[in-house]
Amino acid sequence: MTEQKTENFGPKKEKSAGIRENVLREMAECEKSYSDNSQVKERGGDFCKRCWPTYFFNNFVYRLPDEARNLFESSEVMDKLIFSKEKGKRRGMTPREFFHDIDKTIEELGFSRKDLEDFFWACEKEKDYRPLLTGDFFDLYLRLREKGYSHDDLTL
């Protein structure tokens, strides 16, 4: 029994490490792409350092549970297959299924939905998004990637 757990743990850990490396590489590419943008260059290096994480995470914050999403909970659209043309894991899911998986992951990680949302908006207020690259926000994004969601699934 112990051997089986060890065997299952090893590949999963390697897979997680590989996904983390891929995400970090994607982030580095995103930062470079963002800093190469002529409009960003005009605003200066400090602006780029503070703001490129929003370019990477794009709409990820809108996948988190909040009051606006709660308004749609009873809507028919939550149970319609609107992700049929997606390429990633989200393909074939209804919005309710997709959001439920995100909510479940937040709970599995022991995070507070409100704290995640408040944290993002605090970064927004300060116009410094570098804290998003560490801590719970990043850990949630990474865990969802480990579950098979693509960057586009989570940010577009």
Image (cartoon, helix red, strand yellow):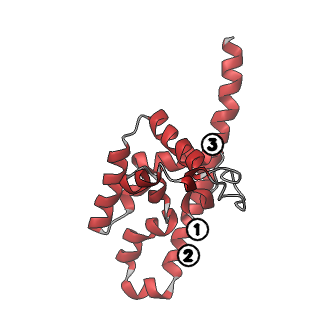
- Quadrant in which residue 16 is drawn: top right
For the residues labelled 2 and 3, say whether their Cβ atoms are less than 8 Å apart. Answer: no
Name the N-terminal-most of marks 2 and 3. 2
Q: Is residue 118 above or below residue 130?
A: above
At horizontal 48% and vertical 42% (from top left) the residue drawn is 103
Q: Which mark is residue 147?
A: 3
| Helix, strand or loop for disc 3 | loop
Residue 38 image position (x, y, % from top left): 49, 88
For the residues labelled 1 and 2, say whether their Cβ atoms are less than 8 Å apart. Answer: yes
Measure the alpha-carbon separation of dots 1 and 3: 22 Å
At horizontal 67% and vertical 29% (from top left) the residue drawn is 10
Question: Looking at the figure, which quarter contains the C terminus?
Answer: bottom right
- Reading the image, the residue beneath label 1 is 29
Question: Looking at the figure, which quarter contains the N terminus?
Answer: top right
Left or right of 145: which side holds 85?
right
Of badges 1 and 3, the one in the foreground is: 3
Residue 127 image position (x, y, % from top left): 31, 69
At horizontal 61% and vertical 57% (from top left) the residue drawn is 153
Residue 78 image position (x, y, % from top left): 55, 52
Residue 143 image position (x, y, % from top left): 55, 43
